[in-house]
Image (cartoon, rainbow, N blue to C red):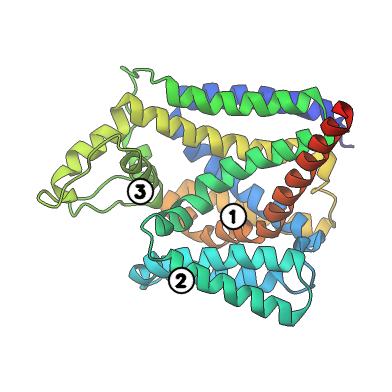
Amino acid sequence: MSVKLTTDQVNYLNIILMLVSAWLAFAFPFELFLLVYAVLGPLHYLTEISWLHDKGYYTRRKHDFVFLASVSALISLLFLGPFHGIQDKAGPFLVYLAFAAGLVFLLLEDIFKRIIFFGLAGLVGLLLMNFGFFSPLLGMFFPTLIHVFIFTGLFLLGGALKGRSASGFLSLLVFVGAACAFMLIHPVHSQYQPGDYVRNSYGYFKEDGSGSSVFITLNYQILKMLGLHDFGTPIQPLSAYVGGINDFLYRNPVALSLMSFISFAYTYHYLNWFSKTSIIKWHEVSPARMALVGFIWIASLVLYAWNYLLGFQWLFFLSFAHVLLEFPLNHLTMINIGRELGRLMAGKREAVG
């Protein structure tokens, strides 16, 4: 028998989860991320995809999700196969096409209109490819921090506006406040030293200057983008800084605060999903489907325990698919936020009038 929570109770529960996630992220930045990514991540992918399937993926046509799943499969093939160099250029564009398709699938049913809109979106995407920010934004940040932090914040905002509840706006305020805390507070972890397992699992920079995993590359890209560390110059290549990079990423207070933020964003993203179980009822599925979810989840835990990199590769398609399959819902959330803000402003104008 499941416990039915009210919306206010869920909001207050989420405030507690945010504070606990932030505290643990400050104390154990790398360890917390690796734990929740391996344990909660797979269960989140599986249950959300199952829930989206029952919701029709918020698309107009029954089989629209096949395109988004196919793009996820193609990106996985490019990333995990012998085509990694192609993925660096094609991956961001494919993510953009999937995001555009999510809007098309949400709003349009007519095939002719879809073709026109999608064609125009493709041309815009080709133009955007000429801008340097496009590839890291779509390829690196969109499936990671934008998904787990920005869209989580938008879901909180949408819920607060829809419910017009003080608890909803308070949860949003705590969420933003926690994120700001990581930017302003850089505690010195004098006794903190991640072990070999953490470094091997999260990643490190090799002698050729390349990152051993997508995780460590994310940290590197953010730090470089924000100008917090100069990782190499045209005269001195990245490979000349390898020792310094690894030491900086795992010991420097600013780098550790960034890692704490990443850990917080992922941890709360997963906990937020499971905290809303009594409201969105993702668990109300057939025993056969729940058994399948449980089997894949346990198999994933075993793979992660055996070899973390192998577990990441095993679940790469699922992790990417759940991001792309959520795009129509992301668009719907942004549209609903716009509508609620419009109603709020209209109500204020009427009150003034």
| Badge 1 vs badge 2, beta-carbon distance below 8 Å | no
User: Tag 1's secondary structure?
Assistant: helix
For image coordinates 36% across by 73% down, the residue present is: 82
For image coordinates 53% across by 63% down, the residue present is: 95
| Badge 3 vs badge 1, beta-carbon distance below 8 Å | no
Left or right of 148 on screen, residue 325: right
**Residue 226 position by quadrant:** top left
User: What whole-number distance in Å separates the C-alpha atoms at marks 3 and 1?
Assistant: 27 Å
Determine which of the numbered discs, if any, sits on residue 126 in the image.
2
Tell me if mark 3 has few (under 14), some (14-19) or many (20+) residues whose alpha carbon lies within 10 angstroms of its own.
Answer: some
Left or right of 340 on screen, residue 310: left
Determine which of the numbered discs, if any, sits on residue 254 in the image.
none
Query: At which x and y percent is residue 238?
Result: 19, 49
User: Tag 3's secondary structure?
Assistant: helix
Q: Quarter of the image containing the C terminus?
A: top right
* Disc on the earlier residue, 3 or 1: 3
User: What whole-number distance in Å separates the C-alpha atoms at marks 2 and 3?
Assistant: 25 Å
Query: At which x and y percent is residue 323?
Result: 60, 56
Labels 1, 2: front one: 2
Q: Is residue 174 above or below residue 195?
A: above
Residue type (three-letter) at the residue carrying disc 2: Leu
Determine which of the numbered discs, if any, sits on residue 217 in the image.
3
Residue nearer the viewer, 291 or 193 = 193
Q: Is residue 98 above or below residue 21?
A: below
Residue type (three-letter) at the residue carrying disc 1: Ala
Residue nearer the viewer, 298 or 19 = 19
Q: Residue furthest front?
A: 353
**Residue 87 position by quadrant:** bottom left
Residue type (three-letter) at the residue carrying disc 3: Thr
